[in-house]
Image (cartoon, rainbow, N blue to C red):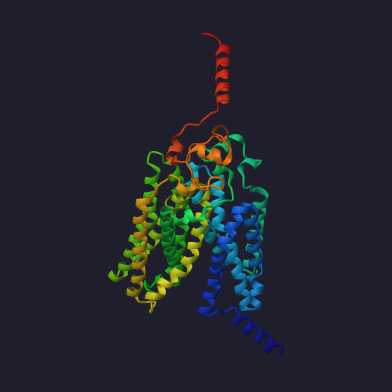
Amino acid sequence: MGILTHRFRFITLHSRFKYTPTEKNYIVWAVAAGTILGTFPINWAYINFGARYPFFIAGTLSVISTAMIPFGASSSFLFLLTLRFVQGLAYSADFAAIGLVTVRWAPLAETGLFMSVMTSFTPVSTSITNPVSGWICESSLGWKWAFYGHAVMCAIVFMAWIGYYTDNPATHKAVDSEELKKIQKGKTRAHIEGDSFVPYKAICKNHIILIVWFNSFAEMTTVTLLLTYMPLYFNKVLGFDVVMTGLLAAVTSFLHAPLKWLSGYLSDSITSIPEHVKMQVLNFIAVGFSGICCFVIGAAKRAGEGYVAVFFFAAVYCAMAVNCGGFYKTGTLVARQYAHFVLATIQFMKCVALVAAPASWAIFVRDESNATEWSYVFYLNGAVLILANIMFVFICTDKPAEFTYITRDNPDGHHDVSAMEIKTGQTEREAPDSVVQSQSISETKNRPETRSPEESRSQQESKSQSQKSSPKT
């Protein structure tokens, strides 16, 4: 009787964790729903309270929900979906935090590097958590400790965040005056002070920002399609076995992060090429070239070239690693002090892509082994990518948009100083040591450091004293 009871419990427990394809979709969509609903409220919290505490609260939600996943899976499917929804809410805090940290901490001349490092969290985390989780699941600890272990690490990371990060570089104990000057070089008073005011309507009507968002949507839809269906395509259409499929997918993912970091560094360090030209080139690689590769993938299997399709799958994912120097950087430089809202909307586009990518696949594919049906999916995504890149070429700029002049005290966006004096009572003498806002990032990089009259006089006095004290030859 005891043996029968034990077997019944084992069968019940095993069947409880064996989800149907529909239930698996619900588990994924619960995260997407939480991210969509949380994106703009969390962005509002960032604008009004800074990134430090809202991001810490999001991290706390992530710790609690991740640690409770095993219990939720054992309790009920509805409770599991609720926990996944909470994980989505926490995930919605990521891109807005990236935007705000870049606005507050990144020098204008290092925007590309900042963006490349911080937006690489997805491939880096995937490269770490997948093998670690697999090892834990195969060990004596069991699959539950994959969630408990990640919850513990998440708690440690966010304790470090709340203990070390501040929203204002000027108040951070590790930032000296020289570093602060470097961070603030080329930024306006509104950019440095970080007012909670955001001209949402003006930003959403700006054609450059709209095309940046369209590029992000096109790129993320294709990335989601590849990451979700690449193993299925390799196995069902190209005929690779499960082991080879896993190896090919892992190699492709591994190359993404180093290429992203390298492109961010090169985007900032190469000064012989105009900034807008660099962004056009990198965006073509990330979006336009990826679109061309999608067409090749769609046609390759028809010609019987399975390995050609694999190569161009890897080419698409690697090419998209340089997006930080393309539409990401353009959105950040054009929006300047309002870049956090632009990047938060890109996060929203990522959520929409979680729905659009499976939808584009479901429209055309009825037989998972039919290469012709799959080709239509790649043709559609390739066409959208190429269109997005063509539009980007004509609007690409590193100059701040007109809406960056709009502030709480200057709602009409006047450019002249006299108008600002009327609104705020401040004079040009009171403004921080920064360049005029209409300067491009290229001009900011090439501009020499400015000095106040007192600094210049002090430098001249010290120079003359050193000349007097030096021995005559």
Q: Name the side, left or right, on which 443 lies relative to 408.
A: left
Image position of 266 with respect to 306: above or below:
above
Look at 55% across and 56% down and name the residue there: 96
Give whichever of 114, 263 is nearer the camera: 114
> Horizontally, is 118 left or right of 175 in the view?
left
Q: Residue furthest left?
A: 303
The front one of 417 and 122 is 417
Query: Which of the 4 image quarters holds residue 430?
Result: top right
Q: Considering the image in quadrants, where does the N terminus appear? A: bottom right
Left/right of residue 393 with respect to residue 73 in the rendered view: left
Say above or below: 242 vs 101: below
Residue at the farthest top position: 473
Residue 283 location in percent, x, y? 39, 53
Q: Image height check: is 232 above or below 444?
A: below
Q: Is residue 89 above or below residue 442?
A: below
Instruction: Look at 61% across and 77% down and name the residue there.
Output: 78
Judged from this view, the residue extending furthest toward the front is 422
- Tell me residue 452's x, y (percent): 55, 28
Front residue of this view, candidates 69 and 283? 283
Q: Position of residue 472 (x, y in %)?
A: 53, 8
Mark yes or no: residue 305 visible: no
Q: Is residue 15 visible?
A: yes
**Pick the front one: 2 or 31:** 31
Name of the residue lying farthest toward the right: 2
Q: Locate residue 149, reporting x and y percent.
A: 64, 63
Q: What count of labels does the image hold?
A: 0
Quarter assignment of residue 215: bottom left
